[in-house]
Image (spheres, grey):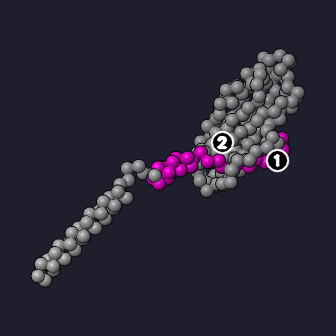
Amino acid sequence: MRRKLLLLTILLLPFLPVRIQAEGSDRYDIHIRITEAGIQKTSADDIVLSRMLPGDEQTYTLRVDNRSKEEQELYLKLCAGEGQLTEILELQVTQDGHRLYEGTMQDAQRGIAMGRYTSQEMTTIRITLRLPKETDNAYSIREAAVDVELTALTIQESVATGDQTQRTLLISSTLASISFLIIIVRRRRKDHEEAR
């Protein structure tokens, strides 16, 4: 029973929440720190698109700093609500010069894998939002919010499932104890027979 409980606990560890703190230094930059305490996010950490006309683009910088003691696997999710805006708004996400995603905002709502980050590792992500020139002025944006979500999964070392050390030790101890008891019983019988 204890072994099953321990195994269940080990399997659930990667899904325990990790604290994510976000700071909006200005409307273009967001700094997210990953710590051990849990997840924290406010609406102030979202991207606010203001005054976009067809052909315009806006770029935002997202800095992610893993201050936890464990390696983390990160996923970025950007949501601009429902409707035709998500089908039209183009998105490009680059990380340290490498393109992670390019497509519509609607497809990005599924999540973008950012990779694994060791303890104390930092990365910078550039998010570029474009309203294509081909769209008409009906899609001009006066103001819209894009929700920035970051998911961090703790990477735990895998448990050796084929480890037989405990079982072998238990069997060896049991056999040694039985052998010791047999020796004691035989000596007592021998002493008892000699005493007659």
Q: Is residue 188 above or below residue 14?
A: below
Q: Is residue 85 left or right of residue 194?
A: right
2 horizontally vs 95: left or right? left
From this view, report whether residue 190 is shown above or below residue 126.
below
**Amino acid at circle 1:** Ser
Q: Can I make out residue 154 in this image? A: yes
Q: Name the residue type under label 2.
A: Thr
Q: Residue at x 85, y 17 (%)?
A: 138
Specify whether residue 29 is in view.
no
Q: Nearer the viewer, residue 177 or 11?
A: 177
* Image quadrant where one finds the C terminus: bottom left
Vertical order, 192 against 32 (above or below): below
Residue under the point 72% across and 27% down = 105
Q: Measuring from the top left, give residue 135's x and y in whole percent.
A: 80, 17
Q: CA distance from mark 1 to mark 2?
A: 21 Å
Name the residue located 70 percent from the left edge and 47 percent from the top edge.
39
Q: Is residue 50 left or right of residue 168?
A: right
The mark that comes first in sequence, 1 or 2, is: 1
Residue matched to label 2: 151
Is disc 1 placed on a helix, strand or loop? strand
Question: Marks 2 and 1: in contact by CB < 8 Å?
Answer: no
Q: Residue furthest front?
A: 196
Whether residue 18 is in magenta: the answer is: yes
The disc label shown at residue 25, or none:
1
Looking at the image, is 191 positioned above or below residue 13? below
Category of crowding for the residue at label 1, using alpha-carbon neighbours closer than 10 angstroms: few (below 14), some (14–19), many (at least 20): few
User: x and y percent of residue 167 in the render?
Assistant: 35, 57
Other residues around mark 2 within 10 Å, as few (<14) / some (14–19) / many (≥20): many
Q: Which mark is drawn over residue 37?
A: none
Q: Please provide the residue range marked out in magenta.
A: 2-30
| Residue 172 percent coordinates (x, y) | 29, 62
Q: How many marks?
A: 2
